[in-house]
Image: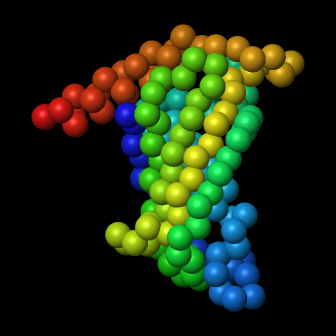
Amino acid sequence: MIRSIAQVEVRYAETDMMGFVYHANYLPWFEIGRTQLFKEIGIPYRQLEAEGYRLPVLEVSVRYLRPALYDDKVSIVTVLREKPLLRIGLEYEVLRGSELLATGSSSHAFIDREGRPVRPPAWVVAKLDEALKAQGESTSR
């Protein structure tokens, strides 16, 4: 399992008339978490795209438990549980301190510039193997 935590401060523009974060704004937060997780383990999206790989969203879900509010400082916890083959699945938690506000998941496919499904490049697989091994070792101590 690979885990990453990103911090976001809720902007006024992300709220609705009730003062709650508008539901669709959780998806960009998931993207922040996803790209940070990849960056932390040495897989920058920019490099993937430069090499002709894309990771479109196949499926996304969100479960809202409590509202996030303007000026809240929230944490987006992103988890990758297993090494991807053609698809990659991620799980998310949005927290204000220790309070769980929302959970979610997303599924993505590795595709080439023409939109054909492909396996991730070897260097990505190596980085994922390394990160999964390191996380496994740190949790087994």
| Quarter of the rendering occupied by the N terminus | top left
62 or 31: nearer the viewer:
62
Q: Residue at x 69, y 68 (%)?
A: 23
The image quarter containing residue 70 is bottom right
**Residue projecting furthest to the left:** 141
Residue 52, given in percent of the width and then of the height, sits at 74, 20
Residue 69, given in percent of the width and then of the height, sits at 57, 81
Q: Is residue 99 left or right of residue 68?
A: left
Residue 17, given in percent of the width and then of the height, sits at 75, 88
| Quarter of the rendering occupied by the C terminus | top left
Is residue 39 something that shows in the picture?
Answer: no
**Residue projecting furthest to the right:** 114
Task: Look at the picture and state if 64 lies above or below 92.
Answer: below
**Residue projecting furthest to the top:** 122
Q: Is residue 106 left or right of residue 123?
A: right
Task: Look at the picture and state if 134 lies above or below 40.
Answer: above
Q: Is residue 79 left or right of residue 13?
A: left
Task: Look at the picture and state if 86 lies above or below 6.
Answer: above
Is residue 92 something that shows in the picture?
Answer: yes
